[in-house]
Image (cartoon, rainbow, N blue to C red):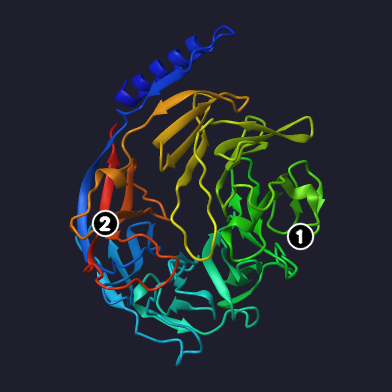
Amino acid sequence: MNKLGVIFLVSLVIILNGCLGTNQKPIVIDETGNTGSIEQVIKIDKVWAGHPVGFCLLTKGERQYIAYYNGNRNMVVGQRNLDEENFSLHIVPPTYREKSGGTSTVLGWDSHNSVTLGIDKDGFIHLSGNMHGHPLTYFKSTKQSDISTIVQVMEMVGREEKRCTYPRFLYSREGEMIFTYRDGGSGNGNQIYNIYDCQSKTWSRMLDTPLTDGQGLMNAYISSPTLRSDNWYHTYWVWRDTPDCQTNHDLSYMKSPDLQHWYNAFGKAVELPATIEKNLVVVDPIPVKGGIINLAAKLCLDAENNPVFAYHKYDSAGNLQFYTAQILEDEWIYKQVTDWDYRWEFKGRGSINSEVILKGFNKREDGFYELDYWHIKYGNGCILLNDQFESCGTVLKPEPINTQLKPEDDFPGLMVRISGDIGKSEEEGARYILKWETLDRNRDRPRPEPWPGPSQLYLYKMKSEE
């Protein structure tokens, strides 16, 4: 039996022994030995370090693609075969909003302006990014599997494309490529979904109506519809009334068998678009200033494939705590998981620096659940939950990779940034990450000089121990 198998069996015995009796002691599962190794490091390029913005790494078959901003803030794309030592890089021709219909390939100071990639069923590469309430900025390759041939396409469908934010490429159960973005602004926007036809090489609306509609009063910060183990698509969101992040409220949820027909958690049909009046989709009616921020929630399915949520909000004393929401007898039941003496009072506009992050909420192979987090006061941790979603112990995890890797430059305030792979390696136990360094967010405003010099962007190949 390998090392991981031994650890699993020992952990299971600890859990079973610890759960006997009514005066159960907190369970401690030690998984710090479940470490991996860095098998390969590739230097890619020098990148902008004045503030963070999302980069993209996509592994597909035997090829790998990247998109990022270099030290001059230019958008760059690259590719390599997995057996090659370096990426072939291509600087996207610099364009500026004043002369390019409001689009641009040069990064400003907005940390919302990430870049993202998608690959259609025929192997053509699609890219979108550098927009926060700007006209659609979208590119497509003219050759299959060749990111260097991307050219800008000024529209997809031709409507609701003037104020786009949060672009994402998704895939249906059948492998059809979907593109989603917010049309409108923070506190006033709708979620749009387009679907790509490989035969005609054109986009069309996937839905006749937006998935969510803020009715001019709010917008939904929504997760991508994700196909889960029950073979249904699941999505959830919080509403926000204004650009001020403290006006988030009402954790909500829907599911669908086909991305066309939608239902609430209890199987009742939801007529699209989902709006704030449709209380049947509300998981927890958290009020404005109630302690939930956009997408500060995670979803998993329980043993009966019912949705269960972990999220944070304020307790009766005003401290920020983690909670769970589960379904019992056709209603949502809420349980407080933590009892911390700390209040993160977030407010204001622009990209904010998080003080509490819910990193993961997952069902374990042993039947328990774990809630993985980072807290500015309490650090990294992982809470073990029983099948009633009550805290029953702790899972000790290896030190996160972003804390193991230290900044190479001594410029004050530089932090290590990590970006995972939105694709997947076919090599068992292998995964890839990007690593670079930047200063923290600055509410999307220019930072006075001096600025740090460009930092080194690396690709790390990680391999878990067998």
Quarter of the N terminus within the rendering: top left
In the picture of the structure, the residue carrying the numbered disc 2 is 459
User: What percent of the width, then of the height, locates residue 151?
Assistant: 42, 82
Count of number-bearing discs: 2
Are circles 2 and 1 on residues that touch, CB within 8 Å?
no
Q: Identify the residue under disc 1.
A: 275
Label 2, residues with CA under 10 Å away: few <14, some 14-19, many ≥20: many
- Residue 200, placed above or below residue 407: below
Give the x, y percent position of residue 388.
63, 25
Residue for point 34% across, 80% down: 92
- In the foreground, 7 or 310: 310
Q: Would residue 199 be visible to someone looking at this image?
A: no
- Tag 2: residue type? Leu
* Residue at 24 percent of width and 47 percent of height: 405
> In the visual, does 92 lie left or right of 262?
left
Query: What amino acid is at disc 1?
Result: Thr
Can you say whether 140 is above or below 416 in the image? Answer: below
Alpha-carbon distance for marks 2 and 1? 42 Å
On the image, which quarter does residue 106 sit in? bottom left
Classify the position of the C terminus by image quarter.
top left
Whether residue 465 is visible here, answered yes or no, is: yes
* Residue 292 vertical placement versus 206 (above, below): above
Q: Is residue 447 toward the left or the right of residue 422 in the image?
A: left
Closer to us: 152 or 328:
328
Dot 1, how many residues are within 10 Å of its Cα: few (below 14), some (14-19), or many (20+)?
some
Q: Provide residue 114's location: percent of width, then percent of height.
A: 43, 67
Residue beneath the point at 54% across and 62% down: 348
Residue 269 on image: x %, y %: 81, 51
Assign a secondary structure to mark 2: strand
